[in-house]
Image (cartoon, coloured by chain):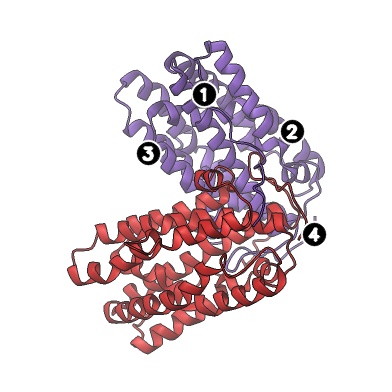
Chain colours: A red, B purple
Amino acid sequence: MNAMITPQPPLAAPLAEPLSPEGLEAALRAIGAARYHDLHPFHDLLHGGHLNKGQVQAWALNRYCYQAAIPRKDAALMGRCTDRELRREWLHRITDHDGFGEDAGGIERWLVLTDGLGLPRDYVISTKGALPATRFAVEAYVRFVQDNTLLEAVASSLTELFAPSIHRRRIDGMLANYDFIDETVVAYFRRRLDQAPRDADFALDWVKRHARTAEQQQAVLDALTFKTEVLWAQLDALHHAYVTPGLIPPGAFRPTISGG
Amino acid sequence: MNAMITPQPPLAAPLAEPLSPEGLEAALRAIGAARYHDLHPFHDLLHGGHLNKGQVQAWALNRYCYQAAIPRKDAALMGRCTDRELRREWLHRITDHDGFGEDAGGIERWLVLTDGLGLPRDYVISTKGALPATRFAVEAYVRFVQDNTLLEAVASSLTELFAPSIHRRRIDGMLANYDFIDETVVAYFRRRLDQAPRDADFALDWVKRHARTAEQQQAVLDALTFKTEVLWAQLDALHHAYVTPGLIPPGAFRPTISGG
């Protein structure tokens, strides 16, 4: 009836032989270079000052879902980890986001951002206005960490290797381009400039030491690919709903202000 | 800093008083009228003959993920069900899709559709070319049925109440508008014209009998809303990747033919 087509892109062949630790790191970094969400056009619009305030609100309240899920993800990882040293090292990821003692934590800093954008806190925290696709992607990440091996769970955190440059561009771009953004509201990203590299370096070293067979290394590469999909899908959903074609799903947040 | 905005749409107030069974049915049908994916512009394009063959391929191979997950969803429901009568009634949903005896089943009929569109079976079945957002939405549905009450799991199937009219439009529209579509490839939808109403009528009756309190009824309404989000998000992802703006995520299927 029809000639079969060759699917594009073709299915990648799995690793046949184990890589050296350095080779594995290079393969992980290549995934970031090809798939990290700094390549998504929504980020160019966000950082370049090309969004209106309503679109920035939509981004912030959707991204809140992701921020709010991170401590659950990290607790799920620790809940499956019999290595006390790894748990001791991993713990600060939870307190970085949930806060501890004097530090209110990253989720609070994110709410300072949404406050600054004029969004009611109870609405943001309810996640009722977030896009369903955002929630599906975020929960897929939490489930991935619950359901896969500890090695894959750790590897899925490695997108943080690529985070500092995007955070620097975000801070500079948003401060320069939006009059509704000031130092208070970018505090989340300033803090992550220190936190993310420390976490990423630890996780990368751990993965390089623990992924020795070709199968384990393939699982690590697949885990990082999966995580890039989680991040990318969130921006696709924002772009579709609030930029082009601007088709907001039933029930999702509808900006009432469009000015800069 | 900024005046708080009033979120749009506002948070819906939960039911305060229980509805009559007929009132509950009317509320369920109102959710379908407002949120079912027959309202999505992608379906107008699909049924109206406005997509090229590559776009129809993308739709079919993404929708395969959903079709392939349905028996897992129904098995998860049965795995939590202590009511033997309900299990006996529910069982045919699995065989409708997986096949039984002489009947090859709905998933096979879906593969006849993707065969007819020229897609290699192993590529479709691998789901490697599907959009990550499709997989996230589909797995969110399976998880919902695993994690929520049996009442909510049954209620989430009620989108089938709204399916026959979209299937009729799909059969007529696709046969009339695409020269690569014939009776063989629409067999899946012809069969669902009989199956879906029987299933939907049973589930609606069951829900009306078992959801008596306002809380239970609210949970039922929320479950159906959730399910409409699962369906809508799949079309949003297709529309964004393959129609407007046509931004295909890294790694996803790239059509190599664009002719009708």
Q: Which amino acid does label 3 sit on?
A: Asp
B246 vs A201, nearest the viewer: A201
Comes first in the chain, label 3 or label 2: 3
Residue position marked by numbered label 1 in the rendering: B199
Q: What residue type is labelled 4?
A: Gly
Q: Residue B202 appears at what percent x and percent y?
A: 49, 18
Residue position marked by numbered label 2 in the rendering: B169
B112 vs A118, nearest the viewer: A118
Marks 2 and 1, how far apart in space?
A: 20 Å
Q: Same chain, marks 3 and 1?
A: yes
Q: What residue type is labelled 2?
A: Arg
Comes first in the chain, label 4 or label 2: 2
Q: Is mark 1 on a helix, strand or loop?
A: helix
Residue position marked by numbered label 4 in the rendering: B259
Mark 3: few, some, or many residues within 10 Å (few <14, many ≥20)? some
Residue position marked by numbered label 3 in the rendering: B147
Kindly identify which chain the residue marked by label 4 belongs to.
B
Residue under the image location 40 percent in, 55 percent down: A142
Kindly identify which chain the residue marked by label 1 belongs to.
B
A179 vs B85, nearest the viewer: A179
Q: What element carries label 2?
A: helix
Mark 2: few, some, or many residues within 10 Å (few <14, many ≥20)? some
Mark 4: few, some, or many residues within 10 Å (few <14, many ≥20)? few
Q: What residue type is labelled 1?
A: Asp
Quarter of the image for residue A218 reads bottom left
**In contact (CB < 8 Å): disc 4 and disc 1:** no
